[in-house]
Image: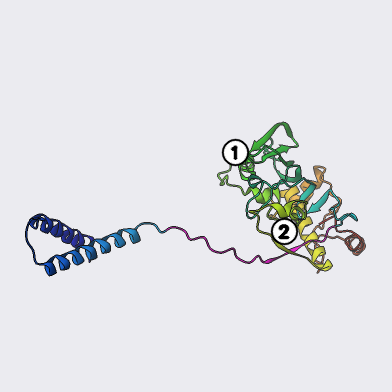
Amino acid sequence: MTNYGKNSVINDIHEERLLYSPNTPTPTFINDKRDREIDKVLNSSFSSSSSSSRPKRIRKDPVEQKLRRVQPLETFQNGQYKLPVRVGIITVHSLGNVLPIATYHNDRYIWPPGFKISRTYLSMTNPTTNTTYTCSIEENGEQGPKFRVIAEDCPQNPIIANSATGVWTTIVKSANEIRNRGHSNSASGPDYYGFTHATIAKMIQDLHNADQCENYVWQKFDVMHKRTAAGVAAAAQKKITNLEIMGSANKKPSKQDIHAALSNGYDSSFNKQEKFYKKSTLHQIMNTPDELKSQQDMWSSSYNYV
C-alpha cells in the first residue's frame, strides 16, 4: 500500500471515530473489528516510516586479528630495542612510555608520550628541496596527547595539533602551496608517524603498560625470515634514495636526475656511483659484487638498517 493510500485510510478511520461517538450505541463485534483495523493500519504505517529512515549501524564483533610480519631488530638483554633504528623510510629515536588512559590510545593505535621519529618530506619553505621532519608525542593531561613536528629547515615554527593527522595535514598543505600544486591536502597522520608500520606497531605494543590499554585491540606479529628482511631493507633503501632525489618515495630517478643530484653534492652511504639499480635477485640497489657482498655481510650481522 502506498503512503497516499495509507494516509487516506487513516483519515477515513479518524472520520469514522468522529461519527461514532462514545454515546452512540454500536454492536460489540463492529467495535472490535474496527479497533483491529485501526491497529493494523497504524502499525503498518509506523513500520513503513521506521524502515524508510536510515538504519542504525550495528557494531560487529571484533574481527580476529591477522598475523602481521615484522622486521627483525636488535634488542638489549632486558628486551628493550636498540635505538635509534631505521624502519623503512622512518628512523625511530624513542618509543616513549605508555599511559594506560583512554585518551592516549584507541582500538588500533597507542600514542605514548616521548615517542619520537624522523623522516624526510618536502620542505615547507623551499620549493626545490626536501627536509627532515622530527615527529614527537607530548603528554597533555587527561585530554590526550599533543603531536609536535619540527622541520629541520624551519625549527622556529613547530607544528602542533591534537592528532597526528591534524599536524601532518598542515605540513602537506604548506608544502603543496609553496609548489603551486593542486593536489589534495589530505594526509594520513598514522602513516607519517609510522603507526601503521607493522614493525613500529610491535615496538610500541611491546612497551610496559601497553596491555593495560583497555580499548586497544591486541595485535599478532611474526618476525620475518632473514632473507625476506634483507629484501625489505633493500626496497626501503631504494625508496629513501627516490625520496632524497625525486621528492617522492615511489618515483624512480632517471640517469639525468642522478647526474644532477651528484653534481649538486648528493652523497649517500649506499649510493655513491651512477648505476643505482643494478639488477640483483636480493639487492637491486648495489653497484658491484664486492659492494653487494659487504652489504650482505652487514645485513647478516645486524638488522638496524631496515
Of 258 and 176, the residue lying toward us = 176
Q: Secondary structure at mark 1?
A: helix
Of 52 and 178, the residue lying toward us = 52
Work out how far the residue at label 2 is from the one at label 1, CA to CA, in angstroms: 32 Å
Q: Secondary structure at mark 2?
A: helix
What's the residue type where badge 1 is placed?
Glu
- Indicate how the structure is coloured in the image: rainbow
Q: Is residue 12 above or below residue 117?
A: below
Q: Is residue 73 visible?
A: yes
**Which residue does the numbered mark 2 point to in the structure image?**
198
- Residue 67 falls within the magenta-colored stretch: yes
Q: Quadrant of residue 4?
A: bottom left
Q: Is residue 140 above or below residue 84?
A: above
**Which residue does the numbered mark 1 point to in the structure image?**
177
Q: Which of pointers 2 and 1 indicates the residue nearer the eye? A: 2
Q: Position of residue 234 (x, y in %)?
A: 80, 60
Task: Rate crowding at label 1 as few (under 14), some (14 to 19) or many (20 or more) other CA atoms within 10 Å.
Answer: some
Of 263 and 50, the residue lying toward us = 50
Q: Earlier in the sequence, mark 2 or mark 1?
A: 1
Q: Which residues are magenta?
A: 56-73
Q: Position of residue 253 (x, y in %)?
A: 73, 54
Pointers 2 and 1 in contact (C-beta within 8 Å): no
Q: Quadrant of the C terminus?
A: bottom right
